[in-house]
């Protein structure tokens, strides 16, 4: 494991390692009130390939709106319950939201689906 500036990652893969302990002190972020029409919930373009892959790509394209990205990852998982990458990415978002139990459950599901993958360890 490599560590710098409070970040931990695997040097071989570049994969971030997330600690599953809640932070001891949270710093409140200021709330900025968006103006009218600032954000709208975009709908994906018509499907061109696999529906699960489509929702996964939609989530990747909408990482700036965490709710939309989480919804899209969940749709991908509903369509393909063995979509390991969707579990991993949704787990990361849930971890960042502070939903540690949900993140662990998602990572465990990914690890159970892809036990041979050296990048997924729980």
Image: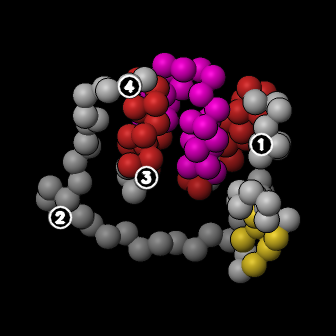
Residue at position x 79%, y 37% in the image: 117
- Quick one: quadrant of the C terminus? top right
Residue 45 falls left or right of residue 101: left
Q: CA distance from mark 1 to mark 4?
A: 27 Å
Secondary structure beneath disc 4?
A: loop
Q: Callout 3: helix, strand or loop?
A: loop
Q: Earlier in the sequence, mark 3 or mark 2?
A: 2
Q: Position of residue 63 (x, y in %)?
A: 43, 52
Judged by depth in the image, the label closer to the viewer, 1 or 4, is: 4
The disc, 4 or 2, on the residue closer to the chain's N-terminal end is 2
Residue 47 visible within the image? yes
Protein image colouring: secondary structure
Which residue lies under the disc numbered 1? 120
Which-is-in-front pick, marks 3 and 2? 3
The span from disc 4 to disc 2 (Cα, nearest Å) is 36 Å
Could you tell me how far apart the alpha carbons at marks 3 and 4 are, in whole angstroms?
21 Å
Q: Position of residue 33 (x, y in %)?
A: 27, 66
Which of the two discs, 2 and 1, labels the residue nearer the N terminus? 2
Figure check: 20 above or below 71:
below
The mark that comes first in sequence, 1 or 3, is 3
**Residue beneath label 3, please?**
63
Residue at x 75% of width, y 78% of height: 4
Which quadrant of the structure image shows residue 47?
top left
Q: Earlier in the sequence, mark 3 or mark 4?
A: 4
| Residue ID at (17%, 64%) | 35
Measured along the vertical axis of the image, is residue 59 above or below residue 14?
above
Q: Can you tell which mark lies on residue 49?
A: 4
Residue 90 colored in magenta in the image: yes
Helix, strand or loop: magenta stretch: helix
């Amino acid at each position: 494991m490599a560590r710098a500036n409070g970040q931990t990652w695997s040097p071989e893969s570049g994969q971030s390692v997330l600690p599953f302990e809640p932070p001891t002190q949270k710093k409140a972020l200021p709330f900025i009130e968006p103006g009218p029409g600032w954000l709208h919930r975009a709908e994906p373009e018509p499907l061109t390939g696999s529906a699960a892959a489509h929702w996964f790509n939609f989530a990747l394209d909408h990482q700036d709106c965490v709710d939309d990205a989480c919804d899209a990852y969940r749709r991908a998982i509903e369509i393909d319950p063995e979509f390991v990458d969707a579990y991993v990415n949704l787990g990361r978002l849930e971890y960042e939201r502070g939903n540690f139990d949900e993140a662990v459950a998602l990572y465990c599901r990914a690890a159970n689906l892809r036990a041979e993958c050296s990048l997924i360890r729980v």
